[in-house]
């Protein structure tokens, strides 16, 4: 398995532009998580899905952020309009059932480094 | 709500020396605890996890961690570090069976000196 695949790896955009981050979870995993990593706040859970359904989006910082999971193999995180304070590394992770009993826990992608100028 | 504290932002260890990274958690019930490692520009890789049973947990790359309920701690150890262990280490806690994601500590940056 290729693992959790995120694209793009790096994104530089101008303030006010729309940004879309993409994630392909491991085939067969039924939970998907979006995290944001910054120096100031560390790793924060933004939103998670179970069986393609958003379960908790309380970590989404503002209405400018939205996430979708149209099918089991694809999810997007969109920021519109983007602002410089959105600059961070965004990680996607997936798991099969309870990550407690899974040998691998949550499997993380390599992240998307977003820079908003 | 649960929280995780990693009191050491940076730790420098000589190659071949032993290592202990500290982690304290705050949660009212039995937590599920994880250690992840992040190499520069990479995602997070699971080192080990604890959810029940033996309080001393063995992980990959020669790491182990011990759960001490009385101290609310889950410290990571390695008897002899290698230069390749230089990375960022994150302790995390999950609750409710882990279905609702992880709460991470701020991380400890490990520097290995020759």
Image (cartoon, coloured by chain):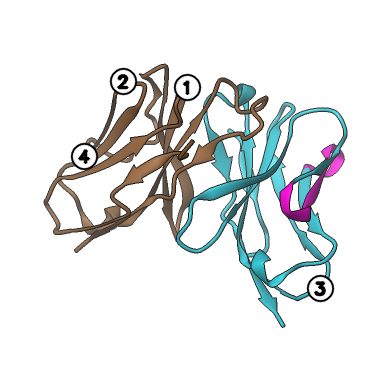
Task: Inspect the magenta stretch and tell me whether residue B15 lies in it.
Answer: no
The Cα atoms of the two marked residues, 4 and 3, are separated by: 48 Å
Q: Residue at x 35, y 26 (%)?
A: A73
Q: Secondary structure at mark 2?
A: strand
Q: Residue at x 78, y 54 (%)?
A: B62
Q: Quadrant of residue B14?
A: bottom right
Residue highlighted by disc 1: A28
Image location (x, y in percent) of residue A20: 22, 42
Q: Which of the two residues, A113 or A79, is positioned nearer the viewer here?
A: A113
Mark nearest the camera among 2 and 1 is: 1
Mark nearest the camera among 4 and 3 is: 3
Mark nearest the camera among 3 and 1 is: 1
Report whether residue B10 is seen.
no
Give chain B's shade.
cyan
Q: Which chain is brown?
A: A
Residue highlighted by disc 3: B16
**In the image: residue A46, left or right of residue B47:** left
What range of the chain is rendered magenta? Answer: B60-72
Mark 2 on the same chain as mark 4:
yes
Mark 1 on the same chain as mark 4:
yes
| Dot 2: chain letter | A
For mark 2, does the 10 Å Cα neighbourhood hold few (<14), some (14 to 19), or many (20 or more) residues? few
Task: Inspect the magenta stretch and tell me whether residue B65 lies in it.
Answer: yes
Instruction: Name the N-terminal-most of marks 2 and 1.
Output: 1
Dots 3 and 1: beta carbons under 8 Å? no
Report whether residue B34 is seen.
yes
Q: Residue at x 47, y 22 (%)?
A: A28
The Cα atoms of the two marked residues, 3 and 1, are separated by: 41 Å
| Dot 3: chain letter | B
Q: Quadrant of residue A75?
A: top left
Indicate which disc residue A71 carries: 2
| Dot 1: chain letter | A
């Amino acid at each position: 398995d290729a693992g959790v695949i995120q694209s793009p790896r790096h994104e530089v955009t101008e303030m006010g532009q729309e940004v879309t981050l993409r994630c392909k979870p491991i085939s067969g995993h039924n939970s998907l998580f979006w995290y944001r990593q910054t120096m100031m706040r560390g790793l924060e859970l933004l939103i998670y899905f179970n069986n393609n359904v958003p379960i908790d989006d309380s970590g989404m910082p503002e209405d400018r952020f939205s996430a979708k999971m149209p099918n089991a193999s694809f999810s997007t995180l969109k920021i519109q309009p983007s602002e410089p304070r959105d600059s961070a590394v965004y990680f996607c992770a997936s798991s099969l059932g309870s990550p407690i009993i899974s040998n691998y826990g949550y499997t993380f992608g390599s992240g998307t480094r977003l820079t908003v100028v | 709500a649960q929280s995780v504290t990693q009191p050491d932002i940076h730790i420098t260890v000589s190659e071949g020396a032993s290592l202990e990274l500290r982690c304290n958690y705050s949660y009212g019930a039995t937590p599920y605890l994880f250690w992840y490692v992040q190499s520069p520009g990479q995602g997070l890789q699971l080192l080990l996890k604890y959810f029940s049973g033996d309080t001393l947990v063995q992980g990959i790359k020669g790491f182990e961690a011990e759960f001490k309920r009385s101290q609310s701690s889950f410290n990571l150890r390695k008897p002899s570090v290698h230069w390749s262990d230089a990375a960022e280490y994150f302790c995390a806690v999950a609750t409710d069976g882990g279905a609702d994601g992880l709460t991470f500590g701020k991380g400890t940056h490990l520097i290995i000196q020759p």
